[in-house]
Image: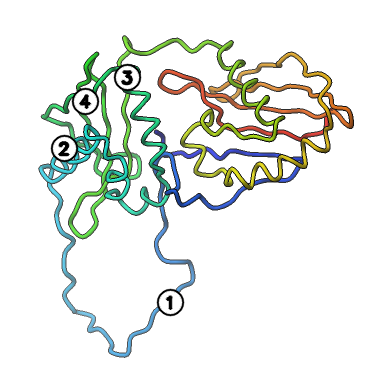
Amino acid sequence: MSRVIRAVAIGLALIGCSSSPSQDPPAPASGSASGSAPGSASASATPVPIDAAVAPAPVITDNDLDAAVMRVFEQWKARQLAAIRDGSHPTLRSVLRVDTLQRMYDTMHDAAGDFVKVEPPFEHGRDRDGDPQVTGKAIYAKGALTFKLSLRGQDGVPLLTDFNLSLPKELQVQAKTEDAVKLSRQMLDGLLKGKVRTELVDPSALVNMASTAEVEAKLKSVVDKLGTVTSISQPLVAGCGGAQCISYDIVGAKTQQVAVFEVGFKVRKWWIRSFDIGKPAK
């Protein structure tokens, strides 16, 4: 799960479709939040002396971090995914969806079997945002995965800001382009029926996608404008930023349009990272 959350761009008849994350709670993966709004000000009726003592921030030790990691994985083993979300730092909790954690859990279970335990000692460092990061091994029935958990202190308590699990090479599968094409066509067939198959969308992209109802309402106008589909071209596949960009020319009774899908490989399967349907054909 990456901290960089990719948006799902939906060009429905050249109408951008975006909204704030749904409150299921919103998903995947992690996020950040700024502090006070620019230009904000505050006033106090009683001036604070310049030399007033400021209480130091509580110190979070490596032992505190390790205990927080152990607690997260106890919840992971018990499949208490909502508890993991609810106990995370507000910057993650505001964007993390329980169904994203569920997909992550299921993906790792399918690849590595049952989760068993984590094994100290852990390594301690800093992630790219400067937060403490704990790295170690998560033992599964079929092998040891590498975990990286980032945490940030709040009132002296380390709270989760990022959760990453990586499969060892022996449990990874090779990414095949034909599987990416098959996935894009499944997504296209659903869209042409007015349905968004969110189970095919990268969990970390769902956070920036409008609600399914909103997308499908706008999708209906695209499908109506297209009319009865008479033919769909063979897919045009091209590499794009480590992913596969796959496009189709769609000929309808009323007009001709183009659908484009960005498909990325993560862990053991392809996911739809973004899709754009409704562009006029050139």
Give the mark nearer the N terminus: 4 vs 3: 4
Picture residue at 81% right of the left edge, 38% below the top: 224
Question: Where does the C terminus fall, quadrant-wise?
Answer: top right
Cβ–Cβ under 8 Å for marks 1 and 3:
no
Q: What residue type is labelled 1?
A: Ala
Image-quadrant location for residue 226: top right
Up/down of 211 relative to 252, above or below:
below
Give how far apart the Cα atoms at labels 1 and 3 are.
48 Å
Label 2 belongs to which residue?
Answer: 70
Label 3 belongs to which residue?
Answer: 167
Residue 245, position in %: x, y?
A: 63, 23
Disc 1: CA contacts within 10 A as few (<14), some (14-19) or many (>=20): few
User: In front here: 105 or 180?
Assistant: 105
Whether residue 253 sits left or right of residue 271 in the image: it is right
Q: Which amino acid does label 3 sit on?
A: Leu
Give the mark nearer the N terminus: 1 vs 3: 1
Residue 30, position in %: x, y?
A: 39, 43
Label 1 belongs to which residue?
Answer: 41
Q: What element carries label 4?
A: strand
Label 4 belongs to which residue?
Answer: 138
Give how far apart the Cα atoms at labels 3 and 2 are.
19 Å
